[in-house]
Image (cartoon, helix red, strand yellow):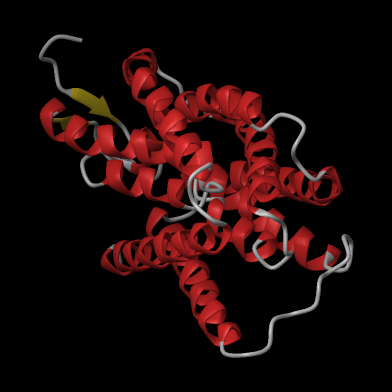
C-alpha cells in the first residue's frame, strides 16, 4: 500500500470519498484489533464492541465495518478451536435463528439507517444493563434459571444482537444482557458467545458482499492487521485462564459501561 492514504466511501447518503491518513488510521486500528482479539479470546465478546468506534474516529463507519469483518472471521476460527465443545448448545438454538432475523433487517435497512442512531441505541443498551447489574447486586442473588425459562428474552436480545452486529459489529452488549443473567460459568459463557458470533459473522459475509462492502483496498488492510488479531486472541485466552469468575464478570461490566458511554457520546454528537 506504500504511503497512499486509505480511501473510504460511505454508503449512507451521497457523500464523496474521504482520504484517510494512514498514520492516524493505524494508531486507532492497532488497539482496535488487539481489543477485539482479547475479547474473543477470553472476555465474552463484550469489550470487542469498542473496536469499530475506535476506527470510526478516523474512517467512515461503513469502511471500518468492512475492514473488521474479515478480521473477526479469522479470529473466530482460532476462538472456536480454543473453546471447542464447551458451549451450551441449548442457548445457541434460541440465539442464532433470532440473530439471522436481525441480520436480515439490518441488511434491508443498511442504506437508510443513520450510523449515529445505531451507536446511540447500542450505547443505551450497554448503560441500561450495567445500571441493572449494580441495582441487582444490592438484592439477594437470583435463583438458577432453567434453560428455556427466558426464551422470549433470548429471542429478543439475540435479534437485536444480529441487527447491531450487522450495522457496527456491536452485538456484544445485547448478548450480555441475555447471557450474563443465565448463571453460566465463565468458560461455558465464553464458548457460547464464541460459537454465536462465529455463526453471525460468517452469515454477515453474504449481505456484506451483496451490498458491495468488500473492496480490494479494504481487504488488503484487513490482511495486514491479521497478525495482531492472533496476538489478541492468545492474550485473551491467557487472561481468561488466570482471572477468577467474579473478577472476570466485573471486568466485562466495567468495559461494557465505558463502551456504552463512548457510544452514547458518539451517537448524540452526530445529531
Q: Quadrant of the C terminus?
A: bottom left
Task: Give the quarter of the image for residue 60.
Answer: top left
Q: Nearer the viewer, residue 203 or 7?
A: 203
> Residue 31 at what x, y percent from top left?
28, 38
Residue 109 in sight here:
yes
Q: In the rendered view, does 28 fall on the left or right side of 103? A: left
Query: Which residue lies at the image location 53% right of the left edge and 55% below the top edge?
Result: 244
**The quadrant where residue 119 appears:** bottom left
- From this viewpoint, is residue 110 visible? no
* Residue 163 percent location from the top left of the image: 61, 50
Q: Is residue 262 above or below residue 28?
A: below
The number of discs equals 0
Tell me: residue 58, above or below residue 164. Answer: above
Residue 164, position as x, y percentages in the image: 55, 52
Quadrant housing residue 176: bottom right
Q: Is residue 269 above or below residue 222?
A: below
In this orientation, which residue lies closer to the viewer: 123 or 192? 192
- Considering only vertical position in the picture, is 190 above or below 258? above
Nearest the camera: 109 or 171? 171
At 51% from the left and 76% from the top, the residue drawn is: 128
Tell which residue pokes out farthest to the top in this image: 2
Closer to the camera, 9 or 77?
77
Amino acid at each position: 500500500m506504500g504511503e497512499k492514504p486509505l480511501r473510504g466511501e460511505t454508503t449512507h447518503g451521497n457523500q464523496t470519498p474521504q482520504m484517510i491518513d494512514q498514520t492516524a488510521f493505524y494508531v486507532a486500528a492497532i488497539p482496535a484489533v488487539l481489543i477485539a482479539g482479547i475479547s474473543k479470546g477470553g472476555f465474552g465478546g463484550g469489550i470487542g464492541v469498542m473496536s469499530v468506534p475506535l476506527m470510526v474516529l478516523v474512517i467512515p463507519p461503513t469502511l471500518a465495518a468492512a475492514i473488521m469483518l474479515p478480521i473477526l472471521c479469522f479470529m473466530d476460527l482460532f476462538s472456536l478451536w480454543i473453546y471447542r465443545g464447551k458451549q451450551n448448545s441449548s442457548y445457541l438454538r434460541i440465539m442464532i435463528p433470532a440473530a439471522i432475523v436481525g441480520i436480515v433487517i439490518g441488511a434491508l435497512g443498511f442504506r437508510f439507517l443513520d450510523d449515529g442512531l445505531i451507536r446511540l441505541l447500542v450505547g443505551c443498551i450497554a448503560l441500561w444493563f450495567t445500571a441493572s447489574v449494580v441495582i441487582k447486586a444490592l438484592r439477594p442473588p437470583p435463583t438458577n434459571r432453567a434453560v428455556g425459562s427466558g426464551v422470549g428474552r433470548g429471542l429478543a436480545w439475540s435479534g437485536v444482537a444480529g441487527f447491531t452486529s450487522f450495522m457496527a459489529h456491536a452485538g456484544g452488549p445485547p448478548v450480555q444482557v441475555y447471557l450474563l443473567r443465565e448463571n453460566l460459568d465463565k468458560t461455558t459463557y465464553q464458548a457460547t458467545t464464541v460459537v454465536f458470533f462465529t455463526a453471525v459473522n460468517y452469515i454477515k459475509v453474504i449481505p456484506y458482499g451483496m451490498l458491495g462492502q468488500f473492496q480490494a483496498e479494504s481487504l488488503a488492510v484487513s490482511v495486514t492487521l491479521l497478525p495482531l488479531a492472533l496476538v489478541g486472541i492468545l492474550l485473551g485466552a491467557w487472561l481468561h485462564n488466570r482471572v477468577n469468575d467474579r473478577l472476570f464478570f466485573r471486568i466485562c461490566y466495567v468495559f461494557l459501561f465505558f463502551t456504552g458511554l463512548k457510544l452514547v457520546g458518539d451517537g448524540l454528537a452526530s445529531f
